[in-house]
Image: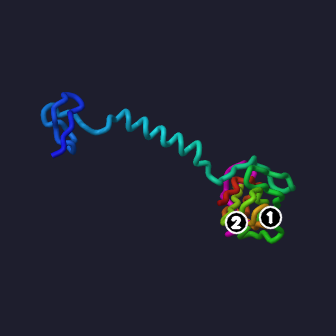
Amino acid sequence: METKKCKKCQEEINKKAKKCPKCGSKQGMPTWLIVVIVIIVISIIASTGESSSSSPSKKKEGGSAKDTNEKFTLLEHQKSDESNQYFMYIEGKIKNNRDRDMSYVQVTFTTYDAEGNTLGTCLDNNSGLQANGTWKFKAICSEGVDKIDHYELKEITGY
């Protein structure tokens, strides 16, 4: 039987014991140490685990204003002429600013009524965008189409 000393009373106890049979002291890792380790791990993940999500500044409907971040540029966007009472489309172009191919890209817009209330989201995705290439997207909106007053870019994600 392998033994160790109790952390509290220094009595020889079984190495696998969770409590000291003499004083009842727990033999596991102290709670404060577990909390410190968890905080360190979360900090590391938060600082190095930056996702490929991007949230560029939001723009109102239409125009060719450029929303740029390190991975993508929204080159243009506008409401499609094909929109009807059931669906609305937002069409535009996105540029991949990276020197590597992206295997998946998604663009999401949030729609609002005239009072600024959120109505829903519009999205489109693509299973591939070449390095430094552009993608013509057509995001579909199906919620509250008859009440949509304007929309804003929510995010462009990709990996």
Quick check: can you spot residue 149? Answer: no
Q: CA distance from mark 2 to mark 1?
A: 14 Å
How is colour applied across the structure in the image? rainbow
The question of residue 91 being in magenta is answered with no
In front of the other: 127 or 119: 127
Going 78% across and 55% down the picture, which residue do you hit?
73
Q: x and y percent of residue 25 in the render? A: 21, 33
Going 78% across and 69% down the picture, which residue do you hit?
83
Looking at the rendered structure, the secondary structure element under dot 1 is strand
At label 1, the amino acid type is Thr
Circle 2 residues within 10 Å: few <14, some 14–19, many ≥20: some
Residue designated by label 1: 134
Going 76% across and 59% down the picture, which residue do you hit?
96
Tag of residue 124? 2
Q: x and y percent of residue 134 in the render? A: 80, 64
Contact (Cβ within 8 Å) of mark 2 with mark 1: no
At label 2, the amino acid type is Asp
113 w.r.t. 81: above or below:
above
| 18 sits to left or right of 79 | left
Going 17% across and 42% down the picture, which residue do you hit?
14
| 46 sits to left or right of 5 | right
Q: x and y percent of residue 81 in the render? A: 83, 69
Going from the N terminus, do you reach mark 2 or mark 1 first?
A: 2
Q: Residue furthest left?
A: 22
Q: Residue furthest top?
A: 9
Q: Nearer the viewer, mark 2 or mark 1?
A: 1
Circle 1 residues within 10 Å: few <14, some 14–19, many ≥20: some
In front of the other: 153 or 21: 21
In front of the other: 110 or 76: 76
Q: x and y percent of residue 78 in the render? A: 82, 61
| 122 sits to left or right of 17 | right
In the rendered structure, which segment of residues is drawn in magenta? 112-129
